[in-house]
Amino acid sequence: MSVKKVDLTHLRPYGDQMDDGAVQLSFTLPIPDGPRGREAARQMANSMGLSEVQVVFSQDLKENFTFFVVYGHLEKYADYTSIKAIGVEAPKMDMEQVNDYISKYVKRPVVVIGATIGTDAHTVGLDSILNMKGFHGDSGLERYKMFKVHNLGSQVSPTDLAKKIRETKADIVLISQIVTQRNIHIKNMTKLVDILEAEGLRKSVLLIAGGPRITHELAVELGYDAGFGAGSMPSEVASYIASEMAKRALSSSKER
Amino acid sequence: MNDKPTLKLNQDLVRKAREFAKEVTDGVQKFINARSTTSVERTVARLYGVDGISESGVPLSNVVVSDVEKANGLNRGIAYWIANGCVAKQVSPQELAEAVGRKEFSLIDLPPQKESVVAEKIDEMTGKALSYVRKIRDERDEMLKALGDPPQPYLYVIVATGNIYEDALQAKAAAKEGADVIAVIRSTAQSLLDFVPYGPTTEGYGGTYATQENFKIMRKALDEAAQEVGRYVRLTNYASGLCMPEISAMGALEGLDFLLNDSMYGILFRNINMLRTFVDQYTSRLVCAYSHITINTGEDNYIKTSDPISRAHTVTTSQLINEQFALKSHMKPEYMGIGHAFEIDPDVENGLLYEIAHALLTRELFPRATPKYMPPTRHMTGDIFKGYAMNTLYNLVSIMTGQSIQLLGMLTEAIHTPFLQDRYLAIENAKYVFNNAKALGKEIEFKDDGFIQKRANEVLENAVELLEHVKKVGLMSAIEEGTFGDISRKKEEGKGADGVFVKGEDYYNPLFETMESELEGEEK
């Protein structure tokens, strides 16, 4: 007896057998509960590319809304072999290693400026990366002796941020966006890039975005150097900063 | 009520904690009594019937108050100027404000009218305002009595679509599924606006504005749902920020049940000037006390950033301070939704035991209050299944320790504002646990000197120690030192400092004076 081997060019979800394509879904439809509603849910799953669809649960949510739990088998697949890594690529270092790395290659403390921009008042994400205490036992950037951190807090306008970048001679700009309703974070992030470019500051800083709905891909697409999503640790951000700053220091010394 | 286990708290410590908290707030209260703010004066204008906005979009309550402020007349109180204007022009407060909004005249330039006539006018306006507030309050009380107060813990959920009409629809669905309290999430950053926006919100970011019209729309929707389900449904909004007293007045006028209202939240988490916040919270809570609006304090915020175990005593300390400030506003304990939260890292060994000890400490320390318990947020990761399990434990602690107001955790916390189905799943979870473990609290006795009793007493002890220090240096200096939430705020810094002023010798504000004396009468 052998176990069927995974076909990485035709990657499918795994339920309890290789290649069964099993997925679970839950969603709400703005219709009343009943046989017709369940059929609508089934067809909805069909149109997503699922076969052998089972609507295992439906619940009246009142005011003509119904909640469904649905299982099915996905026919579609992804080609894993053609995917290049799209996350932030940096060697993982701890606090001591980051400090040593910066001392060795950058040879001076790195100035970090952080803010939440636009109307976003939430500093939870920013604080967990910057504040001494950090997150889950992973110390924040303020505790690193080779970082000089300016935490500007919430609701900083892009223009004020640009002014502060000049004042502090910041190397790193960290912005956090938590509120993502109606894609307000995209607008805020784009506006910042525009202003930094207009002010001629974009190239002189490493621009990093963070937030639960931020991905590296999205950040790069919007003109940032890197993006850190949910669950990112201060040490990951620190490692990235150290290795990028070292790269920049090395390339600029070569130019001279 | 012997339906929950006891912690056998050291009663000597309990007495000391209250005594110290009282002394801490006594010092600040002297300061408060001598002052008013632009927001307090705008509240007076609103209660006298000034509503709406000027042609350039400025709320008329701001228009009349800045008109007098610019001419340095505010230390007399806005009541006099409105009354004098109404007598001089023979118009209503609203008509008067509209005319000032059109820049027809300044209140300061109107000739002073006969003193006795102005005094009569003030009495008339005050009587009218208070009888309207009482009417709304009595209507709410009667409806609550008629439909019946649901059993505690109340199931509290939020709506946050940014469109008040869609919020109303979702709120109705939630009420029909079993929600007892609906909170309408407020637009990001309203707390920093020095005016209250006007009209219905249909495209808000991160919620809707707290406007009188939005309050009205939601109140109507919830009352309809309440009649349908035969159960009273409470409405919550947020008073915190630069307009604390004004929003309380709007809540009073529109019959809100709960308002988020903390004596120090604005200072610490919104960088609002501390003098401004202390003066504002007093009037804000006075209006709540008079209108039977339950305040919800914000201690959950402390342990969203600081460690919930090592800093647990800062929660207790703040609760005691909030209680004393509320008592000074003549608020009855049953209208105090004392805040706390279930935020301990789920990886901590015996984390549940700590949570039980902390939750029961709040319950036992404030036996007549209606504690508001807040769900896990900081360790919610996007693993919705683990999140659902954490919310189940949170609900279990609540029913076991006899909490009053249960803000239901959402399994999608940290991902997005709740989906309709998330709210349903949260309500199902709470209903299941509350029913399944209904009498659990009655059955439990904690081991003498066991983990839970020891832990609760330890937190209380640390709180007493901290309060003793705060008493020594004074509350304002303690805030400057960064005692609360690891955040330091300076006395003269922060937003809204310029709106605080010392009452003049001729300051007159019969509206709040009458509220105070009526409530004092009730206390006796």
Image: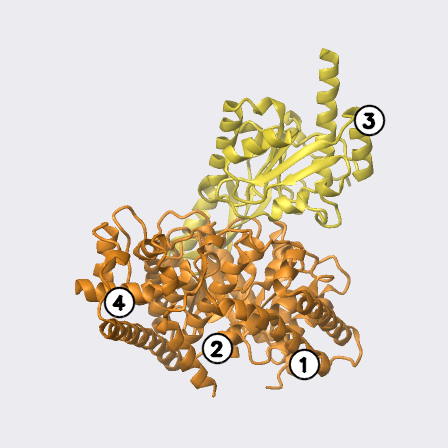
The chain containing the residue under callout 2 comes to B
Q: Residue furthest left?
A: B90
Which is more toward the observer, B36 or B256?
Answer: B36
Element type at marker 3?
helix
For mark 1, does the 10 Å Cα neighbourhood hold few (<14), some (14 to 19), or many (20 or more) residues?
few
Residue B425 visible in the picture: no
Q: Work out how far the residue at label 1 is from the one at label 2, CA to CA, in angstroms.
A: 20 Å
- Chain-order first, disc 2 or disc 4: 4
Q: Callout 4: few (<14), some (14-19), or many (20+) C-alpha neighbours within 10 Å? A: many
Report the amino acid beneath label 4.
Answer: Ala
Quarter the N terminus of chain B occupies: bottom right
Q: Mark 3: which amino acid?
A: Lys
Residue at the disc numbered 3: A104
Q: How many marks?
A: 4
Question: Which of pointers 1 and 4 indicates the residue nearer the eye?
Answer: 4
Give the alpha-carbon distance from disc 2 to disc 4, as whole Å. Answer: 27 Å
Q: Chain of mark 3?
A: A
Using the rendered image of the protein, determine whether residue B398 is visible from the camera's viewpoint: yes
Q: Do the numbered discs 1 and 2 sit on residues whose CB atoms are within 8 Å?
A: no
Residue type of the residue flagged with mark 1: Arg
The kind of secondary structure element at disc 4 is helix
CA gap, disc 3 and disc 4? 74 Å
Letter of the chain shown orange in the rendering? B
Chain in yellow on the image: A
Residue indicated by mark 4: B83
Q: Helix or strand or loop: what does disc 1 sit on? A: helix
In the visual, does B198 lie left or right of B414?
Answer: left
